[in-house]
Each structure stands twice: as C-alpha cells, then as structure tokens.
Image (tube, rainbow, N blue to C red):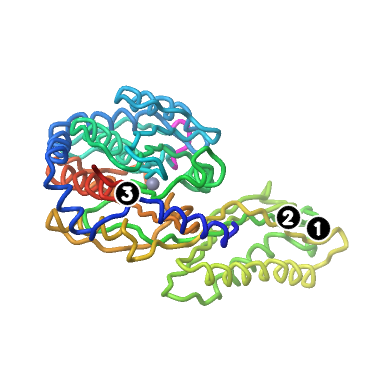
Amino acid sequence: MKRLSSLAVSVALCFAMPAVAAPADSVSRIVASQSYKTAAAALDSGHDQWVKDIIAITQIPAPPFKESVRAKAFAEMLRERGLDPSIDEAGNVLALRKGTQPGPVVVVSAHLDTVFPEGTDVTVKREGTKLMAPGVGDDSAGLATLLALVDSMNAGKVQTKSGILFVGTVGEEGRGDLRGVRQLFTKGEYKGKIGAFFSLDGGGLDGMTSGATGSKRYRVTFKGPGGHSYGAFGIVNPMVALGHTVTDLYKIRVPADPKTTYSASVVGGGTSVNAIPAEVWLDVDMRSASADELAKLEKQFLAIVPNAVAAENAARSTTAGKISAGLEPIGDRPAGHTDPNADIIRFAEAAYRSEGLTVKQGTSSTDSNIPMSLGIPAITMSRIADGDRAHAPDEWIDVSKTPNVKLQRILLTTILATAGVR
Ligand SMILES: [Zn+2]
C-alpha cells in the first residue's frame, strides 16, 4: 500500500467531511430532534422484524468464497427498504442512501461470509430470547442490525448531509483476507470517496474496535524425496523440518504490549504410516497491533524455515534428494488505528454516554483494518448486546429487546453524528 498517497487522500477527505460542532453537542442535538425520536421508536417497534431478519439471514449458508446466495437475498432486503442495491466485482452488496450534500460517503457495513463450510446445519434454534446456530451472531446479527438502521432512518425521514453507503462485505473471515473491503477502498467506484467507515461486528455494550490487529499468514510446504519407512530409513524427512520450524517459532519472544502473537495452526501431508512423506505442510498465523512488531516477527519466522531445512539436510542422507520449503502467503491484513481524537470515536463515546454507558476502545481484526491502514476514520461497533461462541458450532446470541434496542440507538446516533444531519 502506498502510505503517503493514501494519507494525502484521507487528509483531503477529512476536510471534505461536514464541519461539526463539539461531539457531545452534536449528539445531544441529534438525540433531541423529532426525526431521531421517530427513528428510535422504529427500532423499538421493529424489534420482531430484526429477530426475523437475523433468522432468515443465518439460514442462508454463506461459506467462505460462496457468499453469493446470501448476497442476493441481502440485496433484496435492501431493495424492499427503498434502496437501489448493486453487487460489485468482489461480490459486495452496495446500497447508497443519498445525502443532501455532495462529497464523501459514510459506509455502514456488516460482513456476509461465515467461517462455516458448505453442508453445515445453519437451522436456528430458539430458547426464550436465545438464538443458536453457526453464524447467528457473526455476522448475521450485524447484517440484520444494518437493515434495522435503514428502517429507522426511513421511518424518521432522516436526511443526512453525507450519503450513507450500506455495504454487505464478502471475505471478512479467514482466507477471505478482507477482499471485499479491500475492493471497496482500493478498486471500486467508491475508491477515494469514503470519508468514514463503520463495521457492525462483535458484541457487547461496552466496547468498540478502534485499532486494527495486523496479521501475516503463510502456508509452508516442505518437500523431500520420500521413501519406505523401513527400507529407506536414514534419508531426510520433511516432517522433521516442519517440526523444527514449529519448535523454533515457539522460541520467539514477542511483546505483550503491543500484543503480538503467533500460532502454528493447521498441518497436513504424508500418505501412509509406513512411508517417509514426500510432502507435508503447515499454516502459520502471526498477528500484532503494531505494524513494526508484526514485520519483526515475520522476518524472524522467514529465517527459521530455511534454517530448519538446512538442519534436516545436514542431519540425514540426501542421496535420494534434499528437503526444500516453499512459502505461500495466505493472509495479509494491515495493522493500523483510528486517531483517539477522531470525530468518529468522540461521537461513539458521546452516543454511549447519552444512553448512560461508557465504552472502552480495543484492538481487533475486522473489516476496519483496511480503512484504518489507509488513515480513514473507522471503527467497528457491536452488532449485538450479548452473545458468545462465534466461529463455533454452538454460537449463540441473546435477542432481548431492551439492551439490543439500546445498542441500536447508540449505533444510529453515532452514524448520524458522523454523517451530519440537517
Ligand atoms: Zn465477524
């Protein structure tokens, strides 16, 4: 990414955004307005619809790289709300709610993809206010919350100064590698035209994500001659180089702050218990809240692999062939953060305060990584008041009305303050 030019763009965008009064003032002015009150009332009366939407969205499977069925259905749900959605080259669903002023738009997004493979049973089970299904929270609840926000703005006939671009993104999870949001910011028709970005993801009534955990992910494939486990005993074995790589990776000391981590996560290879494998592979995940620490960690890891290969080639016979290693990058998410004094954060804090709550800032890996790395103000705010076990088959959310409508009011307030209202 060209850092200087992107920063220049974001500075230009900041100046182009509507000028705002002190964040707390604009929030109290918005909250006191009649159109806001009508919009907030619609969140309350629309609660049952929100629950129905969560269930409907969850039950349309959206495995990684296979989001298109859900994308079409989501586009239809936006169309029913009076918007004119389109699907871009990456598969993102985009729908603009026009503003009264020209200039950059404010993006409100949630992601379409789940981590669950094809064939996963996504039937939603309900016990009281608890909904259970893979993907029910992450990020079906985010998509449904986005729809509830559209409904409430329509009900209140809210007119924002900046247009609001509602987006269902593809490729947020795992090997999707943020390809949807990357397309939005670096290639699509809105490239250079986004002034602020919201992702609705994660849960709880006390936190927001204002820092982006960067990650680098690799698949390392070790190859060797292979042979009979008994007859060819003594030749090099790629499994040993893999083992050395894991052991040496876990000797790396990383700082607790900025939090920096690594994981040897997935392995595969080999063909038979009585064969020295010809090929084994390993997936490694490295993360940090700091771009510098991530680069340092990556450099150390990249040095470990050839050392492990050389050690095995020196330890056993290479008469049948040597060990080699190939590195395939399988993930690259940039680190970054939104300035703690940026309006978008001050608005979110004021919106939480207006509901009698305080909010902590945290760091995570979400769609906001891309705008944050480009210097464009971005935060990820909760999609649900309570829930847990995201990415697990027993994922659940609590759809109780009071806390969730409260959260939705906080989202509405923050978004309207950022977009500016007439
Ligand atoms: Zn998510």
> Is residue 236 something one can see in this rendering?
yes
Residue contact between numbered discs 3 and 1, judged by CB atoms under 8 Å? no
> Of the numbered discs in the image, which one, if any, rests on residue 232?
1
Quarter holding residue 298: bottom right
Residues packed near mark 3 inside 10 Å, few (<14), some (14 to 19) or many (20 plus): some
Q: Which residues fall within the magenta stretch?
A: 115-119
- Which secondary structure class fits the magenta region best? loop
- The mark nearer the N terminus, 3 or 1, is 1
**Residue drawn where x is 49% and y is 63% of the image:** 287
Q: Amino acid at mark 3?
A: Arg
Indicate if the residue with disc 1 has its beta carbon within 8 Å of ligand 1: no
The nearer-to-camera label among 3 and 2 is 3
Q: Amino acid at mark 2?
A: Ile
Cα–Cα gap, marks 3 and 2:
39 Å
- The mark nearer the N terminus, 3 or 2, is 2
The tally of labels here is 3
Residue picked out by circle 3 = 389
Q: Amino acid at mark 1?
A: Ala
Residue picked out by circle 2 = 276
The nearer-to-camera label among 3 and 1 is 3
Name the quarter where the C terminus is drawn.
Answer: top left
Q: Nearer the viewer, residue 359 or 195?
A: 195
Q: Is residue 116 magenta?
A: yes
Cα–Cα gap, marks 3 and 1:
47 Å
Cα–Cα gap, marks 1 and 2:
8 Å
